Image: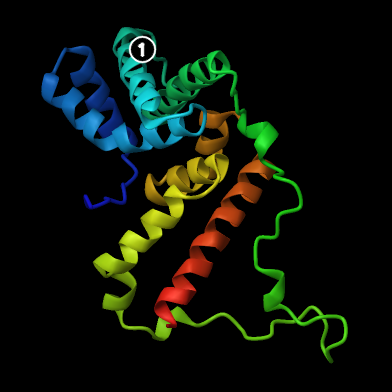
């Protein structure tokens, strides 16, 4: 499995310099932009369309949109937020054509799904109903190599890939690509409350998988 890089947030100066190079037609700058954002763009597109192949087509179309729109980019948002918004718009259109449009705002509540398995809490007949049966492990006492090992990171990425589309999009943007909550809301057109719910549920699923892996 290819290694996944946790992206750092570019400074305003870095972004301005990159934008200048892109507008000047610097191919290396564009290649660097593709390398930085392609995985995130693909993850967002997969939330709206049926297959990876279609998602890849969406991403390619989005890059064309980015190239055509660079001169009109006014910097009202970060460059990456603008790029992800382009992807989301194109993917929503393709999803609608597939009769499977999935706006995040509609998916966010996801019924009454519990973020944590209800069996982990004491029942009404117990002495302390609603309390943990066993408290979550304190991972701060684990060796760093256990938390950052290849096997652990692979597990995290596998769990993320299996999340419901909306949760996968939000956790990918927040925890892998380093987007702020406001950036995610702007890029995916979701409310702050929906963003928090989706992120909480996604992180809870990942944590549950990690507990089984690290505590086993």
Task: Report the front residue among 141 and 95.
Answer: 95
Percent across and percent down for residue 131 are 75, 81
Task: Report the front residue among 164 and 65.
Answer: 164
Residue 101's image quarter? top right
Identify the residue at image location x=70%, y=75%: 119
* Relative horizontal placement of residue 37, taking residue 161 as reference (left or right): left
Q: Residue furthest bottom?
A: 127
Disc 1 element: helix
| Image quadrant occupied by the C terminus | bottom left
According to the picture, the residue beneath numbered tag 1 turns out to be 65
Identify the residue at image location x=34%, y=73%: 147
Q: Residues within 10 Å of mark 1 (few under 14, many from 20)?
A: some
* Relative horizontal placement of residue 126, taking residue 105 as reference (left or right): right
In the picture shown, does residue 23 fall above or below 146? above
Percent across and percent down for residue 103 are 62, 28
The answer to whether any part of residue 170 appears in the image is: yes
In the picture shown, does residue 160 fall above or below 122? above
* Relative horizontal placement of residue 156, taking residue 3 as reference (left or right): right
Residue 71's image quarter? top left
Percent across and percent down for residue 205 are 54, 61
Identify the residue at image location x=70%, y=60%: 114
The answer to whether any part of residue 13 appears in the image is: no
Count of picture labels? 1
In the picture shown, does residue 150 fall above or below 48? below
Percent across and percent down for residue 55 are 39, 26
In the picture shown, does residue 31 fall above or below 216? above
Identify the residue at image location x=49%, y=45%: 168
């Amino acid at each position: 499995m290819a290694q996944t890089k946790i992206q750092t947030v570019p400074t305003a100066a870095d972004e301005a310099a990159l934008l200048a190079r892109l507008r000047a037609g610097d191919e290396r700058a564009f290649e660097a932009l593709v390398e930085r954002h392609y995985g995130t763009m693909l993850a967002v597109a997969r939330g709206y369309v049926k297959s990876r192949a279609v998602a890849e087509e969406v991403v390619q179309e989005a890059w064309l949109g980015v190239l055509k729109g660079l001169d009109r980019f006014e910097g009202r948002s970060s460059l990456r937020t603008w790029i992800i918004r382009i992807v989301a718009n194109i993917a929503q259109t393709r999803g609608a054509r597939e009769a499977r449009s999935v706006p995040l705002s509609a998916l966010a509540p996801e019924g009454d799904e519990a973020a944590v398995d209800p069996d982990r809490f004491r029942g009404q007949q117990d002495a302390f109903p609603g309390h943990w049966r066993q408290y979550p492990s304190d991972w701060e006492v684990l060796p760093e190599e256990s938390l950052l090992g290849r096997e652990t990171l692979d597990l995290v990425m596998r769990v993320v890939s299996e999340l419901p589309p909306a949760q996968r999009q939000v956790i990918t943007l927040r925890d892998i690509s380093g987007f702020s909550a406001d950036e995610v809301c702007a890029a995916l057109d979701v409310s702050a409350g929906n963003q928090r719910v989706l992120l909480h549920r996604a992180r809870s699923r990942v944590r549950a998988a990690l507990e089984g892996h690290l505590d086993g």
